[in-house]
Amino acid sequence: MANPLRGEVIRLYKNLLYLGREYPQGAAFFRERLKSAFMKNKDVTDPDKIKKLLARGDFVIKELEALYFLRKYRAMKKRYYEPEK
Protein backbone atom coordinates (compact mmCIF):
# COMPACT_ATOMS: atom_id res chain seq x y z
CA MET A 1 0.00 0.00 0.00
CA ALA A 2 1.30 3.45 -0.89
CA ASN A 3 1.99 6.08 1.72
CA PRO A 4 -1.04 8.39 2.17
CA LEU A 5 1.29 11.42 2.36
CA ARG A 6 2.70 10.72 -1.09
CA GLY A 7 0.22 13.06 -2.77
CA GLU A 8 1.12 15.89 -0.42
CA VAL A 9 4.82 15.39 -1.12
CA ILE A 10 4.21 15.50 -4.87
CA ARG A 11 2.05 18.62 -4.47
CA LEU A 12 4.81 20.30 -2.46
CA TYR A 13 7.41 19.38 -5.08
CA LYS A 14 5.28 20.78 -7.91
CA ASN A 15 4.55 24.00 -6.02
CA LEU A 16 8.22 24.53 -5.25
CA LEU A 17 9.15 23.76 -8.84
CA TYR A 18 6.64 26.35 -10.04
CA LEU A 19 7.89 28.99 -7.59
CA GLY A 20 11.49 28.27 -8.54
CA ARG A 21 11.01 29.60 -12.06
CA GLU A 22 11.66 33.16 -10.85
CA TYR A 23 14.48 32.35 -8.42
CA PRO A 24 17.21 35.03 -8.51
CA GLN A 25 20.01 32.54 -9.18
CA GLY A 26 18.11 30.90 -12.00
CA ALA A 27 15.54 28.18 -12.44
CA ALA A 28 18.13 25.50 -13.25
CA PHE A 29 20.01 26.20 -10.00
CA PHE A 30 16.79 26.02 -7.99
CA ARG A 31 15.63 22.84 -9.73
CA GLU A 32 18.92 21.05 -8.96
CA ARG A 33 18.82 22.10 -5.29
CA LEU A 34 15.18 21.07 -5.02
CA LYS A 35 15.82 17.68 -6.58
CA SER A 36 18.80 16.99 -4.33
CA ALA A 37 16.80 17.97 -1.23
CA PHE A 38 13.96 15.62 -2.16
CA MET A 39 16.30 12.79 -3.15
CA LYS A 40 18.14 13.11 0.16
CA ASN A 41 14.90 12.35 2.01
CA LYS A 42 13.43 9.81 -0.40
CA ASP A 43 13.88 6.88 2.00
CA VAL A 44 11.99 8.47 4.90
CA THR A 45 8.97 6.34 5.79
CA ASP A 46 8.00 7.60 9.25
CA PRO A 47 4.77 9.65 8.88
CA ASP A 48 5.78 12.07 11.66
CA LYS A 49 9.12 12.77 10.00
CA ILE A 50 7.39 13.24 6.63
CA LYS A 51 4.95 15.72 8.20
CA LYS A 52 7.88 17.69 9.65
CA LEU A 53 9.55 17.76 6.24
CA LEU A 54 6.27 18.90 4.64
CA ALA A 55 5.99 21.69 7.20
CA ARG A 56 9.54 22.76 6.37
CA GLY A 57 8.63 22.76 2.68
CA ASP A 58 5.61 24.96 3.36
CA PHE A 59 7.90 27.33 5.27
CA VAL A 60 10.22 27.49 2.25
CA ILE A 61 7.22 28.33 0.05
CA LYS A 62 6.31 31.23 2.33
CA GLU A 63 9.90 32.47 2.32
CA LEU A 64 10.06 32.35 -1.48
CA GLU A 65 6.80 34.26 -1.77
CA ALA A 66 8.12 36.89 0.64
CA LEU A 67 11.30 37.16 -1.43
CA TYR A 68 9.32 37.71 -4.62
CA PHE A 69 6.97 40.27 -3.03
CA LEU A 70 9.96 42.17 -1.67
CA ARG A 71 11.57 42.20 -5.10
CA LYS A 72 8.37 43.56 -6.67
CA TYR A 73 8.05 46.17 -3.93
CA ARG A 74 11.61 47.36 -4.48
CA ALA A 75 11.03 47.62 -8.22
CA MET A 76 7.85 49.67 -7.70
CA LYS A 77 9.55 51.91 -5.17
CA LYS A 78 12.46 52.46 -7.54
CA ARG A 79 10.09 53.47 -10.37
CA TYR A 80 7.81 55.82 -8.50
CA TYR A 81 9.87 57.43 -5.77
CA GLU A 82 12.94 59.58 -5.91
CA PRO A 83 16.14 57.99 -4.66
CA GLU A 84 17.04 58.81 -1.08
CA LYS A 85 20.12 60.94 -0.61
Image: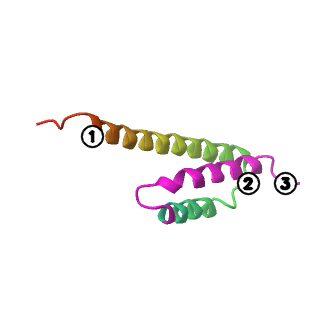
Closer to viewer: mark 2 or mark 1 = 1
For the point 41% across and 60% down, the residue is: 25
Q: Vertically, is 23 above or below 63?
A: below
Q: Is residue 67 left or right of residue 3?
A: left
Q: Please provide percent x and percent y for residue 57.
A: 58, 46
CA–CA distance in space, label 1 to label 3: 51 Å
Q: Is the magenta stretch mostly helix, strand or loop?
A: helix
Q: What residue type is labelled 1?
A: Lys
CA–CA distance in space, label 2 to label 3: 11 Å
The residue labelled by disc 2 is 45
- Quick one: quadrant of the C terminus? top left
Judge by depth and name the residue closer to the eye, 14 or 74: 74
Q: What element carries label 1?
A: helix
Q: How crowded is mark 3: few (under 14 residues within 10 Å), some or many (20 or more)?
A: few
Q: Is mark 2 on a helix, strand or loop?
A: loop
Query: Of the residues under marks 2 and 3, which one precedes in the sequence?
Result: 3
- Give the farthest residue toward the top: 81
The residue labelled by disc 3 is 2
**How has the structure been colored for display?**
rainbow
